[in-house]
Image (spheres, helix red, strand yellow):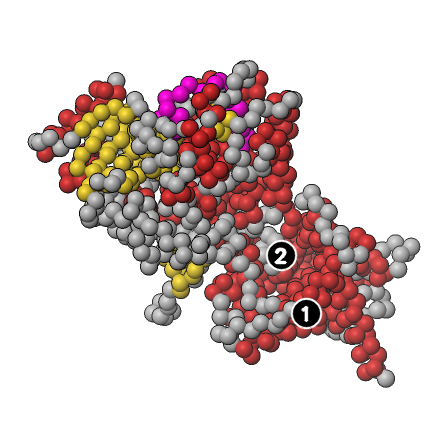
Amino acid sequence: MDLLLWTAYAVIILMLMLGGVTFAILFERKVIGAMQLRPGPNRHGPWGLFQTIADVLKLLLKEDIIPAAADKKIFLIAPVIAFAPAFAIYAALAFDENIYGADLNIGILYLLGVASITMLGVLMGGWSSNNKYSLLGSIRGVAQMVSYELPLVLSVVGIVILVGSLNMREIVFFQESAGIWFIIPQFLAFVVYIISSIAELNRAPFDLPEAESELVSGFHTEYSGFRFAFFMLAEYTYAIAIAAIATMLFLGGWLGPAFLPGFVWFALKMVLFMFLWFWLTATLPRARVGDLMNYSWKVLIPLAILNIVATAFIKVWMG
Amino acid sequence: MNEELLDMITNKINQLTDEETVTEAKMNFHKPMIILPADKWTLTAAKMLRDDEDLRFDFLTCITGVDYEEHMEVVYNFYSTVHDHYLYVKVTTPREEPSVQSLDPLFKSADYMEREIYDLLGIDFPGHWNLRRIMLDDDWEGHPLRKDYITDKKAMGLD
Amino acid sequence: MSDLKTETMTLNMGPQHPSTHGVFRLQLEVDGETIVRATPVMGYLHRGSEKLAEGFLYSQFIPYTDRLDYMNAMTNNYVYCAAIEELFDWEIPERAEYLRVITMELNRVASHLVWWGTYLLDIGAMSPFLYAFRDRETILDRLNEISGARMTFNYHRIGGVKWDAPEGWIEQVLETVKELRENIQEFHTLVTGNEIFQSRTIGVGKLTKEQVINWGLSGPIARASGVDIDVRKTEPYSVYDQFDFNVPTREEGDVYARYLVRIDEMFESLKIVEQACNNIPDGEIIHKKGKKLMMLKPPEGEVYTRAEASKGEIGVYAVSNGKNKPHRIKLRRPSFVNVAILQDLLEGDSIQNLVSIFGSLDVVLGEVDG
């Protein structure tokens, strides 16, 4: 019976998430469109609601091209490896006090660990395509991941010290009992987390692995049809997941005035993060490879460590 | 003032070899123009034009190849960013195996412009570091800007 | 690690690549992301304009000049017409010269706006492109109203211009200038100070004064390296000697300097347009002999005529043998000369800077390939 419930939960979440991705893409195009003096998609359905669905249908109908010189097995499996971990993240998220999947004691550890597997898919895809642009894209991607995984993990440590638990729900409950969201006491960590998560997600201004003006399309240049859709899906699933994690860690998860149910607050906070990313996409040029690495190692990591030390002192001092 | 410049240039070039190198010197639309045969147009002469204190023609603006039925010409347009004056140098070369000293070692701007003339007119530029076709395919036959070039419309799919 | 054997990789950037702005190929030898050698390959868009010119009547070649630098076609029109006029030694009606200046300068602003948008697109900022095109559109509307075409104007004629300004056009242009000035200032405030933008441009793709002169570079590229050459000032053509304007120059020679020079140039061009609109005289718009298009037979002779296009010095070397068709028309295309510097400039730089540097040269492939 339990197994059945779990499966049902997983299927529902998968469906919700696919729907979420559909509208996240629409949302992105609408937001960026509004910032660029144009209406964005508006042909399919009212307000362009069915645009993404039409796009997906088109992708599904496209021929699945595998380059002759590609390393076929790796080429085929790469999109799956990019997508599966992004979806696996959802297992340990809690959307409301009572809506949650696995209540892991090592929640954060699991989330961060699983999330970084996505980059493996990027590397495999870029490497196996046997295309020089893809290769350069995945080289960049790996260098970027190595640099930004560290500050991302370090930024969370402060919260773990304060809460004394790795469990995601515990962290939200702590914020509830303390009466304050972590964005205030852990503001430095929040800034580090947001910046490094953008780099993790390969979003502008850190979208170097797929910089279209330099590397054509980076690691997924050779992908078409359904496999390309998988990479896109992975990207947005991952983006939503990162937004969800940020919501739980820094914005108190489902907490909020009682006139709206918890999961609505949760969704609203996630939308806020998504909007922030789209906003940056529309306004900033792409960063330089060298600057990107420097910024991580010379600014973000020291800041994150500073935050850990300061938090530890406060914790000891306050008891 | 420009006439004085013309005399000065002519004298200086003639002094280089102690003979009448310049076959004709005239004003062309208010700017000095000197005409000399290809075998007298040397790197030394070009270097003198570039480095002489009074001339300083350091900016090679344009190189033009012209095909006349009886001979070919390469025209160099110089400009001096220091003294703000202009010069046409017209180098004549026979139509059979046309060849003019390349200015590439002195002026890098000659690099592409000479390649283009080689490509379209078939004038050889000894001393150029990389004299290959630039606009047309490497295996193109003939040089289209020559007056006796016959456009094979059929082969190009135009007829 | 140091004795690990590595190889360089050959990367063909183009002819189809988002950042080559057309069909241009860069043969790169790269070591990781570092460029060891760069060889430009061109000719994909070669239409043989110079060859075509020899088969046409003098007046028939004007539309072909539009297709060289299609972002700045007015100046191409002008310089060809001016070369033939010089062979004729004609006096051009002043109203025609004023209309030419207005159209050329408006077109220069449009060209720089396109550059501004596409350059930022190259370095990864998407939005400026759409803002730049909005304002370019208003300019194209004005040019459309006077010439009947949006990009390939075919407006200048040997001896003058084709059409007089329609009623109220001059006032509308003044209105547009005002609007543009505000908008360009806004662009400037929005982008120039951005830190990521600055880190991608300051110190990138440095060109020295000596390099510029030796490679024969002209236009904003030269002026950003401290070489103060602008044909409008060094050898004023048309009626440019009647206007009060500056030629912006900078000393740094990097991509950022080229960017600023172009922004400043837009303001100067608007200044010229404004002055020309306020002082435009009445009268004829074409030399009376210029109206007989089929009868144009310039006297024997040859001349090199130059003008300042948005990309640099554009020149026409016209050789006439006294017949009704030109003996030889040589087009000195600024992009073609400017693009040669890539061989020298890219060595040792990265692929990411390549995009930024190549974009900053502002080459148009129609002009490179002729």
Q: As drawn, is B60 to the left or to the right of C31?
A: left
SS type, badge 2: loop
Prevailing SS of the magenta stretch:
helix
Whether the residues at callouts 1 and 2 have beta carbons within 8 Å, the answer is no
Q: Amino acid at mark 1?
A: Leu
Q: In the picture, which quadrant includes the C terminus of chain A? A: bottom right
Q: As drawn, is A65 to the left or to the right of A194?
A: left
Q: Position of residue A210 (x, y in %)?
A: 56, 59
- Give me the residue at 74% from left, 56% from top: A26
Compared with A101, A251 (above or below) is: above
Are the residues under marks 1 and 2 on the same chain? yes
Label 1 environment density (alpha carbons within 10 Å; few <14, some 14–19, many ≥20): few
Front position in the image: C219 or C199: C219
Front position in the image: B156 or A14: B156
SS type, badge 1: helix
Q: Position of residue C168 (x, y in %)?
A: 65, 22
| Residue A103 position by quadrant | bottom right
**Mark 1 vs mark 2: in front:** 1
Compared with A37, B159 (above or below) is: below
Q: Amino acid at mark 2?
A: Arg
Residue sitting at the far bottom: A1
Q: In the picture, which quadrant includes the N terminus of chain A? A: bottom right
Question: Which residue is tagged 2?
Answer: A203
State the extent of the magenta-drawn residues as a range.
C83-108
Label 2 environment density (alpha carbons within 10 Å; few <14, some 14–19, many ≥20): many
- Give me the residue at 23% from left, 20% from top: B3
| Residue C308 position by quadrant | top left
- Give me the residue at 73% from left, 62% from top: A54
| Residue B83 position by quadrant | top left
Question: Which residue is tagged 1?
Answer: A61
Q: How many marks?
A: 2
